[in-house]
Image (cartoon, helix red, strand yellow):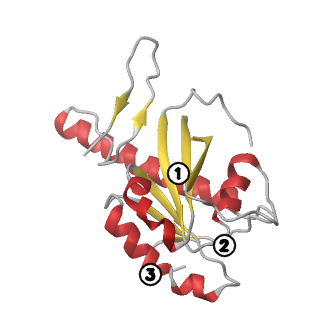
Amino acid sequence: MAQSNSDDYDYLFKVVLIGDSGVGKSNLLSRFTRGEFSLDSKSTIGVEFATRSIQVDTKTIKAQIWDTAGQERYRAITSAYYRGAVGALLVYDIAKHPSYENVNRWLKELRDHADSNIVIMLVADNNLSFIETSALDGGNVEMAFQKILTEIYRIVSNKALESEKQTGANVTAGFNIEIKPTNPGETAKSGCC
């Protein structure tokens, strides 16, 4: 779990965690970013986020992972929460069937408020990537985040290559993504549209 300097990255990807309250979103975030798990974690109030960098191919991907309260009373933050997100982990608890029944509602909210190009992983169906995780023992947590960040990177890289071939311009697949300059003296670029 080697981490690089927080300012040393090639891409910055915002990933949101969504799902019912109490399904383990905060523990997934904590396990991935700090290697920690808490059996007595409290419900999230409002929004929290943490970062961690990973390597994909030869690039450093900095993930900015946002966690929000699953309670309805915090839904007013919806638009700001999804703004700029290029990935989402839609989380449910296999021991809490109602949290699975609410997946469609969360998916609708995500599709109503997030970019149409967002990469979605379900921790079940609906034509999404799927993986079961355990924040408790760390099972597949690393793999889940690696998989979604790698998928986002592949989409961005492929779209940028296609666009460069067609127009000679560098774009980032319709996402707002910060691309850190690799040469001293360059300025950072931000993709859009």
- Dots 3, 1 in contact, CB < 8 A: no
In percent of the image, x 40 and y 67: which residue is there?
110
- Looking at the rendered image, the disc whose residue lies closer to the viewer, 2 or 1, is 2
Disc on the earlier residue, 2 or 1: 2
- Looking at the rendered image, the disc whose residue lies closer to the viewer, 2 or 3, is 2
Against 117, residue 64 (above or below) is above
Against 137, residue 187 (above or below) is above
Disc on the earlier residue, 2 or 3: 2
Disc on the earlier residue, 3 or 1: 3
* SS assignment at label 1: helix
* SS assignment at label 2: loop
What is the distance, in whole Å, between disc 2 and disc 3 at their CAs?
17 Å
Question: Can residue 144 be seen at all in this image of the molecule?
Answer: yes
Q: Quadrant of residue 81?
A: bottom left
Image location of residue 149, percent across then percent down: 53, 51
Asked if residue 5 lies left or right of residue 60, the reply is right
* SS assignment at label 3: helix
Residue farthest to the top, as pictured: 185
Image location of residue 68, percent across then percent down: 55, 60
Residue in front for this viewpoint, 20 or 159: 20
In percent of the image, x 38 and y 49: which residue is there?
84
Disc 3 target residue: 104
Disc 2 target residue: 22
Which amino acid does the dot numbered 3 rest on?
A: Asn
Residue farthest to the front, as pictured: 73
Which amino acid does the dot numbered 1 rest on?
A: Leu
Which amino acid does the dot numbered 2 rest on?
A: Gly
